[in-house]
């Protein structure tokens, strides 16, 4: 994947030396409860309904189901010890994280094993849903569907 032409909207913050260890957990209905759910069929279905308000922010009356669905390829690629991502559904490209501290991350070819991912950017969609599913047997590309409920 050629990232040379990508424009990044967010400049990553570096210099922080704090990491939160996150265990790898098998995704099951029980382990995903409160976070999401397993989906057998990625096609839109009866599950695409308005979401209930969560937290302090209410959903405006007569809203919550007009946002629609967008879909596109979500791609990841490593360049050295830096992980890049591109969300083709919304035309967004960004530096996603590193396998080493950013200031020490190799920019070019590197023979060190990647034992972790220090994720720099994550987002939260309280009034929408996202579904990621493999588009091929390649682990670096996923189909992405996002339902906005604005």
Image: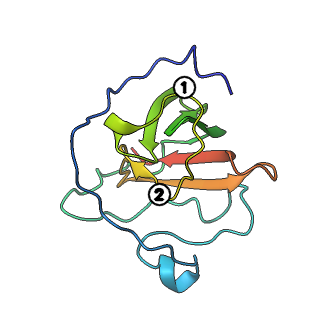
Residue 107 vertical position relative to residue 68 in the rendered view, above or below: above
Residue at the front extreme, as displayed: 111
Model colouring: rainbow
Instruction: Write down the residue under mark 1.
Output: 91
**Number of callouts:** 2
Q: Residue at x 69, y 28 (%)?
A: 1
Q: Residue at x 21, y 45 (%)?
A: 16
Residue at the top extreme, as displayed: 5
The answer to which quarter of the image holds residue 51 is: bottom left
Query: In the drawing, does residue 57 fall left or right of residue 125?
Result: left
Quadrant occupied by the C terminus: top left
> Depth-wise, is mark 2 or mark 1 nearer the camera?
2
Q: Percent x, y for residue 78? A: 58, 38
Q: Tag 2's secondary structure?
A: loop
Q: Percent x, y for residue 149? A: 43, 48
Q: Judge whether residue 64 can be spotted in this image.
A: no
Pointer 1: residues within 10 angstroms few (<14), some, or many (20+)?
A: few
Query: In the drawing, does residue 125 fall left or right of residue 26?
Result: left
Taking depth in this image into account, of 45 and 123 the one nearest to the observer is 123
Q: Tag 1's secondary structure?
A: loop
Q: Percent x, y for residue 26? A: 57, 78
What mark, if any, has residue 116 been given in the picture?
2
Residue 34 vertical position relative to residue 125 in the rendered view, above or below: below
Residues under labels 2 and 1: Cα distance?
27 Å
Q: Residue at x 66, y 68 (%)?
A: 39
Q: Residue at x 42, y 37 (%)?
A: 105
Q: Earlier in the sequence, mark 2 or mark 1?
A: 1
């Amino acid at each position: 994947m050629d990232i040379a032409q990508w424009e990044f909207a967010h400049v990553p913050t570096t210099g922080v030396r704090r990491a939160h260890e996150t265990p790898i957990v098998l995704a099951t209905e029980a382990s995903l409860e409160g976070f999401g759910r397993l989906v057998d069929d990625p096609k839109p279905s009866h599950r695409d309904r308005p979401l209930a308000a969560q937290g302090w922010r209410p959903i405006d009356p007569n809203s919550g189901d007009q946002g629609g669905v967008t879909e596109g390829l979500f791609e990841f690629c490593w360049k050295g010890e830096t992980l890049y991502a591109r969300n083709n559904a919304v035309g967004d490209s960004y530096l996603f994280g590193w396998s080493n501290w950013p200031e020490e991350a190799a920019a070019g070819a590197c023979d060190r094993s990647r034992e972790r991912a220090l994720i720099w950017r994550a987002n939260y969609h309280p009034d929408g849903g996202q579904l990621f599913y493999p588009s091929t047997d390649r682990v670096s590309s996923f189909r992405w569907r996002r339902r906005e409920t604005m």
